[in-house]
Image (spheres, helix red, strand yellow):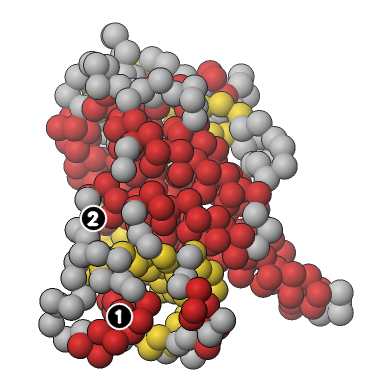
Amino acid sequence: MSDARELQAIREIAHAFLVAEQPGDVQQFALDRVTPLLGATFSLVMQLGDDGELLRPVAQHEWPAPYRQWIGALRVRVGDGPSGVAVAERRLVEIVDLFEAPGLDVWHEVARELGFRSILAAPLETAEGPIGAVAFYFADATRVSDEQRALVRLVADQLAGATDKSRRAEALRRANAALAEANAELEGQAQQWQSAQRARDASESLVVDALLALTGNDDARAPGDRLQAVHALAVAAREYVEATQPAFGLQEADVDPREALQLAVAHWRGRAPMVPVLVDEPTVILPTMRADAATLQRTLQLVLGLGVAGAATDGGQVRAGIRLGRGFLAIQVAWDGRAMFEEAAPGPGRAPLGILRVSPEALRWDASDPYAEARRPVTAVDLPLARALVTRQGGDLRLDASEGASAIRELLLVFPVEAERD
């Protein structure tokens, strides 16, 4: 499987996610593109039922013709077989040779009838848990490569996202129907759902736009370099989905903001030593703040990373500092260097006018770039992800765009604290 073919498949699936009306459209499209790319004989997408115990087929590619008419009756119990185990244990399951694998004797007859020997199964997961599985079946004993496994994981994430998006849209439609009955309580809830839906849709469009840019012909970098950027984007996108779910939890404790900032600075000094990161030490004693230490740490790494990527030029540098005000604590990250943001172009299926996004050009790097390590970990999702994490902690991420997105060279995180400056 060539990197160029994988990039083309990812691009096509990302485009299908953007325009598809139903999750089944994306599921079928993905199977039709990826199954031959992997060299699999046939494939299947299964959805978890409302009982949370049985998987049922919702899409297939080249399922053996003699058995195709009965595929609708197929049910797989969670925990049984490779697909059931993938859902139960929320992991990729690879069976190189089913007839040699221990504990799968019960599947031998089915494998002989359908004509497969190897299986690669991945769970479809959302922040709320697994919702199904995608499985690829091979006629011969097959050991897939790391790149093929990464492709299957990315496809599984896209399929899960399409299904979750459809479910959220259906929930929104039900809320709007209830709103027509003039129920005041439901009206307030529907408005909250609509606001959350708009924010998620805007960020999803940023992800899809970034995928299309990374897999398009305009990017002249080597396919391997672009695949690294695609995989980093997929990880950040999953973090964003989790951070915007109602069930997202925080383990709050008293956290020293100075220590949290120093750890984030140390992370980037180690990761991108070619970009100076200066710290303006506060002259007053800082109070502790109530926060989830890991979430705060990740937030500061994201914001500093945007500054480091912006300062990844000759003579560029980052300045970070903390100041204490009346009832608030502000963490400032500023940089000298290139513009990092632009206003997203509106359009069908795109973010609305006024939404800022990380400029694709600011993130572009290649193996010969002396600042590659400063840009490599930063993705198009880092700004909305940082904003979501700050909001979860009761704070606010502020940017001054009064002079245009290209003029922004500072990010400000503001958190409420009980102590006040004298």
**Crowding near the residue tagged with mark 1, few <14, some 14–19, many ≥20 C-alpha atoms within 10 Å:** few
Q: Are marks 1 and 2 in contact (CB under 8 Å)?
A: no
- Tell me residue 395's x, y (percent): 46, 50
Q: Say whether residue 169 is visible.
A: yes
- Tell me residue 283's x, y (percent): 25, 32
Frontmost residue, 179 versus 68 = 68
- For discs 1 and 2, the disc positioned in front in the rendered view: 1
Looking at the rendered structure, the number of numbered marks drawn on it comes to 2
Secondary structure found at label 1: helix
**In the image, which disc is placed on residue 144?**
2
State the residue at coordinates (53%, 85%). Answer: 70
- Tell me residue 342's x, y (percent): 56, 26
Q: Please, is residue 8 above or below residue 405 in the view?
A: below
Q: Please, is residue 218 above or below residue 66 in the view?
A: above
Is 412 on the left or on the right of 184, as rendered? Answer: left
| Residue bearing mark 1 | 112
Frontmost residue, 102 versus 235 = 102
Q: Of the residues shown, which amino acid type is indicated by label 1? A: Arg
Q: Of the residues shown, which amino acid type is indicated by label 2? A: Val
- Tell me residue 267's x, y (percent): 19, 38
Mark earlier in primary sequence (1, 2): 1
Q: Residue furthest front?
A: 66
